[in-house]
Amino acid sequence: MHSILLLGGIILLLALCGWVLFGLDGLIGMALGAALAFVFGPRISPQMVLRMYRAREIRWHDLPEAVHLVEVLAERAGLERPPRLYYVPSAMLNAFTVGTRDDAVIAVTDGMLRALTLREFAGVLAHEISHIRNRDLWLMSVADLAGRLTHLMSLFGFFLIFVSIPLWLSGAGGVPILLIPLLLFAPQITMLLQLALSRAREFDADLDAAGLTGDPDGLASALAKLERYQRGIWERIFMPGYRLPEPSVLRTHPPTEERIARLKSLSGKPALPPLPTRGDRIEAAWPTVRRMPRGRVIGFWY
């Protein structure tokens, strides 16, 4: 319900921009555009993203424990096809999912594989598989498309205001006064709604992951380790709060401490038995990668 309300707010703001700019025709056009986005949804080719990160597929002979975990978790989640597992040669600790529910890919970095135990890695995989089962990829893509359209209409509206300045000065009228504050604040409000939607989906994915693994402490331990590894030794000593200067409303993910606290609060008998994972680390069949991601002109880091 939370996600529906947030996504509805984003689409309502887009429709309001269309109504102020073009009247009833704009409102109908934005409504039809939103309906088409719901039906089809923007799709990005997983292979295009994986090529950017120089990722390669992890086969059974590479990491049998990891591939087995994906298959078991996908079966527990009720997915018809288990997502494919890909390896990203980067020292960063990260995992992400691309594709659709029927054709999904989970990419994990070299740093992630070497830092986590099998139990912690199972929690991370369950979190990503929860995103796939709940269609969060599609949901966030629709929200992103609505946000981009709102931003585009805001730019177009400012262009109309600029063109209408001579009409205002001559007293011949111009664009509606309501248009100015709407165009100023619509992109920012849309961005805040997108961030809130992302945080809501992250909390839900944590909860579902704990249900899939039957082990909320495994994911909590992984989150704590990721938070610790992502901060250097000097930063932990001299600038412990350096990475959290922004208010919570401007974060795409909830604070790690809050996510861990929620996972720790889960009690009672799990819906599914815990996965039979050992506590040792994953033995990767390739050399350690020490390359960090680099920024590109197009804005991506890989």
Image: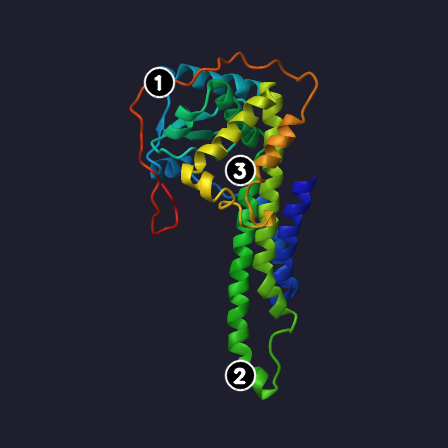
Residue corresponding to mark 3? 137
Which callout, 2 or 3, points at the residue further toward the start of the chain? 3
Asked if the residue under mark 3 is in contact with the one under mark 2, i.e. CB atoms within 8 Å, the reply is no
In the rendered image of this protein, does residue 218 appear above or below residue 51?
Answer: above
Asked if the residue under mark 1 is in contact with the one under mark 2, i.e. CB atoms within 8 Å, the reply is no
Residue 15 found in image quarter = bottom right
Category of crowding for the residue at label 1, using alpha-carbon neighbours closer than 10 angstroms: few (below 14), some (14–19), many (at least 20): some
Asked if the residue under mark 1 is in contact with the one under mark 3, i.e. CB atoms within 8 Å, the reply is no
Residue at the bottom extreme?
170
Residue corresponding to mark 1? 62
Which callout, 3 or 1, points at the residue further toward the start of the chain? 1
- One can see residue 81 in this view: no
Q: Residue at x 56, y 51 (%)?
A: 146
- Secondary-structure class at tag 3: helix
Amino acid under disc 3: Leu
Amino acid under disc 2: Pro
- Secondary-structure class at tag 2: helix
Residue corresponding to mark 2? 166
- Cα gap from disc 2 to disc 3, whole angstroms: 46 Å
Q: Is residue 301 left or right of residue 120?
A: left
